[in-house]
Image: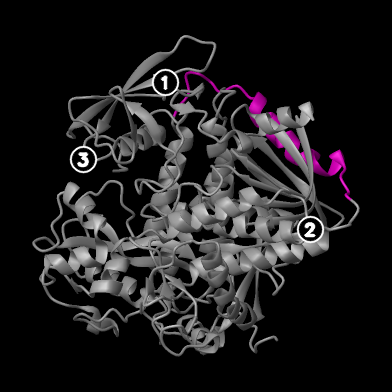
Amino acid sequence: MNAPATNSEKTAPITIQRGAPGEESWTETFDVPWRAGMSVLDAIVWVRTHADSSVAFRYSCVNANACKECIVSVNGKTVYACTQRLLEEGTEVGPLTNKTLIRDLVTDIVPPKENLRTILAERAKG
Amino acid sequence: MIHLETDVLVVGAGGAGMYAAIAAARNGADVILADKSLISRGGATIMAQMTTAAALGDEEPDSWEKHYEDTLEAGRGLCNEELSAILCREAIDRIRELDDWKVGWARKDGNITGVMAPGHSVPRCVYVDFLNTGPAVAKCLRTQVARADTVMRVSGLAINDVVVEDGVVTGAVGWNLEDETPVTIAANAVIIAAGGLTRLYQRNSASVNMNGDGYAMALRAGADLIDMEFPQFFPIGHLAPRLVGMDPIMWDPFRYKLGGRLFNAKGEEFLHKYGGEDAEKYTTTRDIISYGITKEHEAGLTTENGGVHLSFQHIPEEKLREAFGPVIDKLAANGIDLTKDTVEVAPIAHYHMGGIRVNGQMETSIAGLYGAGEVVGGANGANRLSGNAIPEAFVFGERAGRFAAEYARGRNRVWSDAAAQEHLDLLNTLISRQADASGDKAALGEMWFELQNLMWDKVGVLRTGDKLAVALTRIRELRIALADMVPADDAEFNMTLQDWYDLRSALLTAESVTLAAINRTESRGAHQREDFEKMDSSQEQNQRLRLGDDGALLSDYLPVAKGVAA
């Protein structure tokens, strides 16, 4: 799952939505080495490791579906990237549309009481 | 910049960190509980599948002393006996406290029920069905933390450095991931509960944030580490076929409940060749099974994927369902029918026995600096019993919180910007540097990739002096290379800035593990040297590492702490 692509290897395209609030979003497509059964999370981790480390993405537990942090939109459906299989013909990944965008695939899923900016704003109100 | 103040800062919000926050709050302290991931979601606790060892004695006679004897036996002579005794004695209190908090321990006939696990003399490993111990514990502690009025919980706050002035902890420096704002925290006490180092290895079973932060932070603050040569390899991590949505250590619970058999690629049982037991018996400890599978691999007796077969084919479907219910359906969704198919398993980096050197009050050698959970070394010696990691998180977390609160309460808060300046300067430099847009966009990712493969190949299950020397040289080169690397120019959720700091921790931690492994010229527990295959009684001592003034690691030996303190 971790190896860089070689010429002989079959790849699958993953299209990732990029951008932060206040700028026009764009998409980038990466050809990821294909392994039968691989998850969308595997593909995003491959992109961060071998193509572009700056892709913003929230995850912790790595394919165990325990942390529930990797929630994103895949081909228009809200899913966990770790349980969604990558499609050989192509997969489009974007941020959740019903949450505030932070950057790329990361949205504000932090409970307000655990968000430093919200905590400080509440304190300032007294 | 944001400046915060508190009595006690807890770094890391897994099981140990959350327990520390609860305990510090109920002992009268104001607390900030910070995690670079989300509170209760990151770290190893939430990944726990099943076993939590405690000598409750509800179902059959047991005592903490028996648990303690089993722990020392597994630890191969290197356990800090005071810490092991605390762990085994207080595990009982913590398991009962979580029961009061309605975590949902599995019960039989009204009693909390335990299973037998390898190396234990009594069935004492309690759990939450089905494979739900970690999520249930994480949720339960999260609820308790939320009820503690004096705990401020902050997700997405990465702590980089502990600030020490005149040998005393005064706080910490970090940054808010969401907007890259530097954060300083004045704190009378800091508890490091940042978990282990399994991410250093290519095959690992823990969360991505377990990258050695705690060890590196402690070293840089001037504290001691011990036993760093002992990362634990879980022997039967899932290898193939590909599973999604399941933890690679899930086969352990299957073996506890159903037995199962291990075969090499020729269909032969093999553990007897390495001093273990075959057939349905799941009694062989982790170090021996990992060694056995790796030796079979070297002899060309593993599968194409490099693993061995684990079989439950002889167990009827209704028994599988009774033991694991919905998990059987998840396996079916992954195309696996255990009545027909074997699965392939192989060792996987799972836990770290070594870590920060603390006393029974969880204090390091630096005033005001505490450790809790996996990041602490000593309680499990050279090899950890299955089931001892989760109680370690609870017991050491509770103690660290309690003693840190006692220390911090009523102390004058000392904070000077000057003492924090070098840490802030580094952060501000990294933030203000502009990455060359034409440069390698994956340079930090590739460095992670190289480090994980290097550690797996050269500092893994079977080691030699030559392989370790190659690793040490390369790790030192990578440390130098990292200093010149530039994170991307992103103000929001800058993952390359996080990669940079994660690698800084990971490389110092990797160097610690490798240097310690070079120095230990024997085989003991999880540290197996092919060039020194025997255990050497003259090396029954703990290796200590510290950071010298010039930034080089210094190593010496301490006698093992024997004899149980009251």
Structural distance between the alpha carbons of marks 1 and 3 = 29 Å
Res. B450 image quadrant:
top left
Q: Is residue B183 visible?
A: yes
In the rendered image, residue B267, in percent from the top left (x then y), is placed at 10, 72
Location of mark 1 (residue): A97
Q: Secondary structure at mark 2?
A: loop
Location of mark 2 (residue): B28
Q: Amino acid at mark 2?
A: Gly
Q: Amino acid at mark 1?
A: Thr
Q: Nearer the viewer, residue B459 or B108?
A: B108
Location of mark 3 (residue): A35
Q: Secondary structure at mark 3?
A: loop
Q: Residues within 10 Å of mark 1 (few under 14, many from 20)?
A: few
Q: Residues within 10 Å of mark 2 (few under 14, many from 20)?
A: some
Q: Residues within 10 Å of mark 3 (few under 14, many from 20)?
A: some
Of all residues, the one furthest to the left in this rendering is B340
Q: Amino acid at mark 3?
A: Arg
First to last magenta residue range = B413-441
Res. B195 image quadrant:
bottom right
Quadrant of the frame with the N terminus of chain B = top right
Subunit of label 2 = B
Residue positioned 46% across, 35% down in the render: A58
Residue positioned 42% across, 75% down in the render: B125
In the rendered image, residue B383, in percent from the top left (x then y), is placed at 46, 75
Residue positioned 19% across, 35% down in the render: A9
In the rendered image, residue B429, in percent from the top left (x then y), is placed at 69, 30
Have a look at marks 2 and 3 and say if they share a chain: no
